[in-house]
Image (tube, helix red, strand yellow):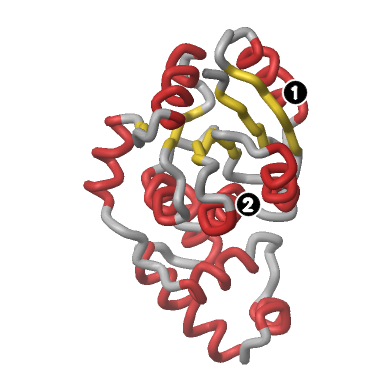
Amino acid sequence: MTIRLLLADDQELIRTALRALLDLEDDFRVVADVGRGDQVVDAAREHRPDVALLDIEMPGLDGLAAAAVLAEQLPDCRVVMLTTFGRSGYLRRAMEAGAVGFVVKDAPAEVLADAIRRVAAGERVVDPELAAATLAAGASPLTARERDVLNASRSGAGVAEIAGKLYLSEGTVRNYASSAIAKTGTRNRTEALRVADERGWL
């Protein structure tokens, strides 16, 4: 049986290398590759892959959001998140989005190939060390709005700019930021953003 694959990664070099690597396997066929998250669903509809390999950080739509749409609209396409970041928060969010596999990009080629075959056969595949770390870390303590405020502050935006971007009052932005700072055990928004990023909460 040939396993039809869709690749989504915004780095062309990585995507091309992955395609070449996977095409070496007799039972794999890469039917589509895209460089943006908002191209994933259309490509999946057109090419009907069995497995989609999605990077987490992509323009247009991140891989987690794309995975959620695929799970809802094309449930026969099984999703493997392929990421540089083996963060426990990312794993939890990927599973919540409907992904059934999670592989870090520095894994050996045979590990990725095995994960694809197992996922195509109906299994869930997650690195055991990462799974253990995810259980130990627990769920993200941040609310959706606290995440929004931290994400909006990435460019160094001030409270007024964040408020305008999120259609919130400045007082509300300050409250969400203070809450996020407290939950991350940090001293300011910049530190809270860094810690939340490191833990895969954003």
Q: CA distance from mark 1 to mark 2?
A: 19 Å
Q: Which residue is mark 2?
A: 62
Q: Amino acid at mark 2?
A: Asp
Q: Amino acid at mark 1?
A: Leu
Residue 26: image quadrant is top right
Residue at 43% in and 36% down? 101
The front one of 153 and 5 is 5
Answer whether labels 1 and 2 touch (C-beta < 8 Å). no
The front one of 153 and 67 is 67
Q: Which residue is mark 1?
A: 13
Residue at 71% in and 37% down? 47
* Circle 1 crowding by C-alpha within 10 Å: few under 14, some 14–19, many from 20: few
Residue at 67% in and 37% down? 8
Q: Position of residue 79 (x, y in %)?
A: 51, 41
Q: Position of residue 162 (x, y in %)?
A: 67, 77
Residue at 33% in and 36% down? 130
Query: Is residue 131 left or right of 175 when viewed as pictured?
Result: left
The front one of 52 and 166 is 52
Q: Secondary structure at mark 2?
A: loop
Q: Position of residue 98 (x, y in %)?
A: 45, 51
Q: Is residue 80 above or below residue 28?
A: below
Q: Position of residue 135 (x, y in %)?
A: 24, 47
Q: Is residue 22 above or below residue 61?
A: above
